[in-house]
Image (cartoon, rainbow, N blue to C red):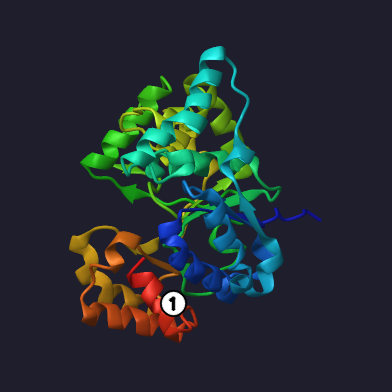
Amino acid sequence: MTQLPSKKLDIVTVVFSGELALLRLQARSIAREFHASALGDIFVIINDHEEAACAEAVEAMRGDYGPFAGKLKVVRPDELLSDCPTLRARLERFYLTHLRGVGRKLRGAGGGWRGNGGWGMQQALKLMAARLGASPYLLVLDAKNQFVAPVTGSDFVAGDGRPRSRVVETEEKQQGWIRASFAKLALPEPTSLATAPPTVTPVVFARDDLRSALALIEEKLGPIELFFARRRGKATEFMLVYAALDQGRGLWWELHAEGLPASFSLFSGRSVGRLPELVAAARCGDCKMIGTHSRLLAAMTETVRKDLVEFWRERGLIRSDSEIEALFHA
């Protein structure tokens, strides 16, 4: 009898202190909606200049993961660093980890790991997560993503063992990310830039594929955290993986199957008016995940906020007024 491929996934979320209230919602949504047979470990990677305090706050949420509390692993970035192949890289890493953040902190900049730029470090850490865990697949999330319907391994891995992806119609900005990422790796562009794999979470990878992609990226660009700490141009983490695996020869869709659930998420102030539509879709079971960027929460009108809070209460994701306060005034 042919043995079916395992569909077990490790979950990875990179978080900073301003997203802790959202991470609590995610934890409770995993406890409520994720099928136990599909879940490996849960890795939360700390990306905050107040690293110890942020790690302690995540550890205090362990109970919010419910039956999966024992699977939570709180990860410090230092645990993920690769060997520096050259003296120049070693000097650059020393500057990055011990010196750069001092001046940036005095200027009120650099809220990420060791005082470096949070967004750039978040991208690097998502790729470095390839070095974590042992499950065959890795599901990469942002703190804003919450599960709002039951999910199983089949939502993220096809029957033939390929991780699921989906076709995204790209805009000019995203096409710039694609061009820059393929160019950084000296690979030919795809025949069409009109569509691409997802540029935002959720994203799922076969762990071996992500490890091989990271190896190629670091071979060309050096240690990935150094690349994202520098002026990297328009290249992004997921489009670099797209380039490394696709090779400009259409290999992405040989390695991936269609059908990855999208997260119905709000990213800009202009999209806040769509929140009632998003909540309605979640109530009807038309989506598996929703999300709202942390910077948009404080900008919501009272009416919009009330609808979202009511939905979160229905799902058991919010349990007190103090948690509401933490979300909207973080």
Task: Please state if 328 lies on the left or on the right of 20 as rendered.
Answer: left
Looking at this rendering, what residue extends furthest in the front direction? 106
Which quadrant, please, contains the N terminus? bottom right
Give the x, y percent position of residue 36: 67, 69
- The residue lying at 37 percent from left, 34 percent from top is 103
Rendered residue at 28%/41% (across/down): 174
**10 Å crowding of disc 1: few (<14), some (14-19), many (20+):** some
Q: Residue at x 68, y 74 (%)?
A: 67
- The answer to which quarter of the image holds residue 213 is top right
**Residue 112, above or below 293:** above
The kind of residue tagged 1 is: Glu
Quadrant of the snapshot with the C terminus: bottom left
Q: Is residue 166 above or below residue 209?
A: below
Quadrant location of residue 267? Answer: bottom left
Residue 247 in the image: above or below residue 324: above
Residue 326: give x, y in percent of width and height. 40, 72
113 or 269: which is nearer to us?
113
Residue 271 drawn at (x, y percent): 22, 63
Direction from residue 103 to residue 24 in the image, left or right: right
Q: Which residue is mark 1?
A: 323
Residue 177: horizontal and vertical position, in percent?
A: 32, 36
Which one is in front, 325 or 290? 325
User: In this orientation, which residue lies closer to the viewer: 73 or 168?
Assistant: 73
Q: Is residue 304 shown above or below 204? A: below
